[in-house]
Amino acid sequence: MMTTLPRLLAASIAFAVQTPALAQTPPPAARSCELDPAFRKFDFWVGEWDVQPTGAPRAPVGASSRVEKILKGCVIFENWEPGPGGAGKSFNIYNSVTKKWEQYWVDATGRITHYFGEFREDGNLYYEAFQFGSANKVRMTFFNQGPGQVRQLGHLSTDGGKTWTVSFDLTYLRKK
């Protein structure tokens, strides 16, 4: 038995050396987020933006947002810079296990919000979460309004989602 094991090992090594195609086959490539249509649905938000309240005339100075794809297209990262203070960042990713979008929002006050959502038939992304530090619920919807404009509408519910009030209504206008 002892002499059989070394012979078997030697035969396996010889086989691998004589069949280079098997010995040199690279591991299967990792799934590319850039090629997966589910990861590409939120690409309309990627860009450099001037942000203002919806319906207001375009302001010469105000909030801005830089939204970019990072980590080989797997994450959509927002760098939010409002006028004075209150800066924040969001990390958006399609969770291929749950088939939902998730956003992790963090800001300069230490607030963290973890949203979960999905694209619906109307092409808009609907997120929902619990408000940081309370039992309140928050909703956020992204409306693709063409290549140069995105609307972001926020709602707040203090009664478990029975009624909602608008908490913010912003329009992102692509920088020229």
Image (spheres, helix red, strand yellow):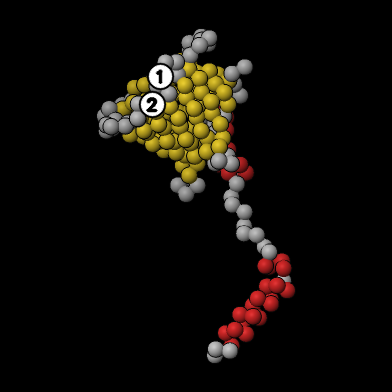
Placement of 103 over or under 31, stated as above or below: above
User: In the figure, is residue 62 to the left or right of 27?
Assistant: left
User: In the figure, is residue 161 to the left or right of 55?
Assistant: left
Placement of 59 over or under 107, stated as above or below: above
Comes first in the chain, label 1 or label 2? 1
Give the number of marks: 2
Placement of 47 over or under 14, stated as above or below: above
Q: Which residue is located at x 49 percent, y 39 percent? A: 93
Provide residue 67's location: percent of width, then percent of height.
54, 28
Crowding around mark 2 (Cα neighbors within 10 Å: few <14, some 14 to 19, many 20+) is few
Q: Nearer the viewer, residue 57 or 145?
A: 57
Instruction: Please name the residue that numbered disc 1 is placed on.
Output: 85
Crowding around mark 1 (Cα neighbors within 10 Å: few <14, some 14 to 19, many 20+) is few
Provide residue 57's location: percent of width, then percent of height.
51, 9
Q: Quadrant of the N terminus?
A: bottom right
What amino acid does circle 1 point to? Gly
Instruction: Please name the residue that numbered disc 2 is placed on.
Output: 108
Placement of 156 over or under 55, stated as above or below: below
Q: Which residue is located at x 41 percent, y 38 percent? A: 116
What amino acid does circle 2 point to? Ala
Residue 162 visible (yes or no): no
User: In the figure, is residue 52 to the left or right of 15?
Assistant: left
| Label 2 SS | loop
Q: Nearer the viewer, residue 55 or 175?
A: 175
Q: Which residue is located at x 62 percent, y 57 percent? A: 28
Provide residue 37's location: percent of width, then percent of height.
59, 41
Question: Which of the 4 image quadrants contains residue 137?
Answer: top left
| Label 1 SS | loop
In the rendered structure, are the residues bearing label 1 and label 2 in contact, judged by CB atoms less than 8 Å apart? Answer: yes
Q: Nearer the viewer, residue 7 or 19?
A: 7
